[in-house]
Image: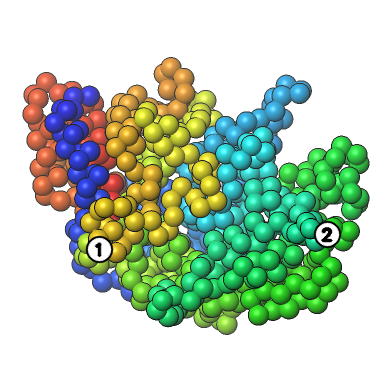
């Protein structure tokens, strides 16, 4: 593929300096979830609600309308990573164990070909809020447990947030990651581990500051949502929880080999062991749980208290908007999503289906505002998934053999379920220092993993992927189907228009379109395939693509 060094340098410079661009979308008002969207609007909805548009799904959504499309997605059975991992383990010789690669294979299979796209995409967003990570040494050896945890996020993505919160809190993978598994009551100078108590408030439910329903602070300066005493009191709730099994012996609590560990303890919900649960009173967030209250009852009270806190709707709603639509939603947008969280229209709080529709079918989601604060930087994993789905990739092994993509020099610098910390790959309120973004007091979370090395690494990685395919092997395991694009290679304007719809929702500026056409036509000896490579690469390298509008 012939791409000049000058153009690559230009892309690098612009991508680092001007990642938040003014919207170039059309101004069609859409306020109802029963509307039949235009192809551009359909592509935009699919960009936010799936791992990427395809020509076929754009046409289908345009024909059946958003209401029917969402109802269809809500009704689809869940595709389980857990099943794939179990099958993979069964295919191994006796004594061999799976690595995290088994989960990654299943992740990419479902991201590309999964019929339940909306569920899979929301599960991925939730995995960046309720974080666990293979970078934890114990979880690195538990691909089945991590796969089940991810499936749990998918299962409750269309359920109720209260049930999701409980399932997260009792999953052994979370218990390992945030050290609530084997947490013990107060004895002498030893006090309960506070890790999960802190993070369930700070990251999973109410955040650090008291919020209005539109996500703004209730006071200036901001009022803290909890104190250190609240953390200490809540930590007592998360004592006595450990491995599932048929008894509640000390050996099972500590995970010793006697009695024999339950073979499914890597995914079965943790159980409470009364001998290790806190018997003292538990005071937090204005609630007092009496002494000697059981672990199960204490947990229900604590989770109900957090679930009903007024912060949860705007706090979680804003993060879902950021993961799916835009980094800087307006207060009105957040308020509409928070209202759906508070009441789904039938008096039910925490209905995730209502929240998802409120996020994805809001007027600000359907039609860009035109403000230079709208949009979000596409994270690297989503960019690769976009390419895979747009060009109907096939895996020669059928397994999608993609391993870690952590390397910033020759890969994406991001791998699913390999966040470096509980704070995800990037924080919701990250502002790149010494930039116009920070000066404007807006945020760009994904910029936290964006710097010179990762930008060049992405360009080099995609340049090879577009031409040679993705994954391991020689030839590479995952190959695109460019047949539709090749049929347009002799009419470059139509080729670019197709890629514009698939990758950029018809928001490509005239300037970028002209640049790509000039590159394609600059060499009369360019083969049809090289024209396709150029059109796709120059689109995916452009700042206009990198910023999802």
- Residue 250 shows up from this direction: yes
Q: Compared with residue 450, is residue 216 higher up or lower down, i.e. above or below? A: below
The quadrant the N terminus occupies is: top left
Q: Which residue is mark 1?
A: 440
Q: Nearer the viewer, residue 7 or 163?
A: 7
Query: Pointers 1 and 2 in contact (CB under 8 A)?
Result: no
Rate crowding at label 2 as few (under 14), some (14 to 19) or many (20 or more) other CA atoms within 10 Å.
Answer: few
- Say whether residue 205 is left or right of residue 193: left
Q: Which residue is mark 2?
A: 188
Secondary structure beneath dot 2 equals: loop
Secondary structure beneath dot 1 equals: loop
Q: How far apart are labels 1 and 2 at the CA level?
A: 51 Å
Q: Compared with residue 338, is residue 197 higher up or lower down, i.e. above or below? A: above
**Residue 480 appears in which quarter of the rendering?**
top left
Which mark sits nearer the N-terminus, 1 or 2? 2
Q: Compared with residue 430, is residue 450 higher up or lower down, i.e. above or below? A: above
Q: For the point 26% across and 52% down, which residue is it?
A: 434
């Amino acid at each position: 593929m012939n791409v000049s060094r000058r153009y690559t340098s230009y892309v690098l410079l612009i991508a680092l300096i001007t990642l938040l661009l003014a919207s170039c979308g059309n101004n069609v008002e859409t306020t109802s979830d029963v509307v039949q969207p235009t192809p551009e609007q359909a592509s935009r909805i699919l960009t936010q609600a799936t791992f990427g548009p395809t020509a076929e799904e754009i046409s289908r959504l345009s024909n059946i309308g958003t209401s029917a499309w969402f109802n269809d997605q809500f009704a689809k059975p869940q595709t389980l990573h857990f099943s794939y991992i179990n099958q993979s383990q069964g295919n191994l010789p006796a004594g061999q164990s799976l690595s995290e690669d088994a989960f990654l294979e299943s992740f990419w299979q479902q991201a590309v070909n999964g019929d339940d796209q909306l569920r899979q995409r929301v599960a991925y967003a939730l995995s960046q809020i309720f974080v666990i990570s293979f970078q934890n040494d114990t979880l690195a050896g538990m691909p089945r447990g991590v796969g089940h945890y991810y499936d749990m996020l998918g299962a409750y993505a269309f359920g109720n947030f209260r049930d999701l919160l409980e399932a997260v809190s009792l999953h052994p993978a979370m218990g390992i990651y945030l050290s609530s598994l084997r947490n013990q009551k107060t004895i002498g100078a030893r006090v309960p581990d506070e890790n999960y108590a802190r993070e369930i408030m700070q990251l999973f439910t109410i955040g650090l500051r008291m919020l209005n329903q539109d996500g703004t602070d209730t006071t200036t300066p901001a009022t803290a949502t909890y104190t250190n005493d609240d953390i200490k009191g809540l930590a007592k709730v998360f004592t006595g929880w450990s491995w599932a099994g048929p008894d509640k012996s000390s050996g099972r609590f500590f995970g010793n080999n006697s009695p024999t560990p339950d073979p499914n303890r890597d995914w079965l919900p943790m159980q409470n062991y009364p001998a290790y649960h806190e018997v003292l009173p538990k005071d937090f967030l204005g609630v007092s749980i009496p002494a000697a209250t059981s672990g199960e009852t204490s947990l229900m009270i604590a989770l109900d208290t957090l679930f009903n806190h007024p912060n949860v709707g705007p706090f979680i709603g804003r993060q879902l908007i950021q993961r799916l639509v835009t980094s800087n939603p307006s207060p009105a947008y957040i308020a509409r999503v928070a209202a759906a969280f508070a009441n789904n229209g039938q008096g039910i709080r925490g209905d995730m289906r209502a929240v998802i529709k409120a996020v994805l079918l809001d007027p600000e989601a359907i039609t860009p505002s035109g403000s230079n604060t709208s949009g979000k930087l596409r994270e690297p994993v989503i960019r690769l998934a976009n390419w895979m789905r747009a060009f109907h990739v096939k895996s020669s092994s059928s397994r999608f053999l993609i391993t870690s993509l952590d390397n910033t020099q020759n890969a994406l610098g991001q791998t699913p379920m390999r966040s470096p910390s509980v704070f995800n790959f990037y924080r919701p309120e990250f502002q790149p220092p010494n930039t116009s973004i920070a000066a404007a007091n807006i945020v760009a979370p994904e910029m936290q993993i964006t710097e010179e090395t990762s930008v060049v690494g992405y360009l080099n990685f995609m340049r090879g992927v577009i031409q040679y395919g993705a994954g391991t092997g020689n030839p590479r395991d995952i190959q695109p189907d460019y047949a539709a694009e090749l049929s347009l290679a002799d009419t470059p304007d139509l080729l670019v228009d197709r890629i514009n719809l698939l990758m950029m929702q018809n928001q490509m500026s005239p300037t970028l379109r002209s640049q790509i056409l000039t590159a394609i036509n600059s060499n009369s000896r360019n083969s049809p395939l090289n024209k396709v490579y150029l059109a796709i690469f120059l689109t995916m390298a452009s700042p206009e693509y990198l910023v999802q509008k």
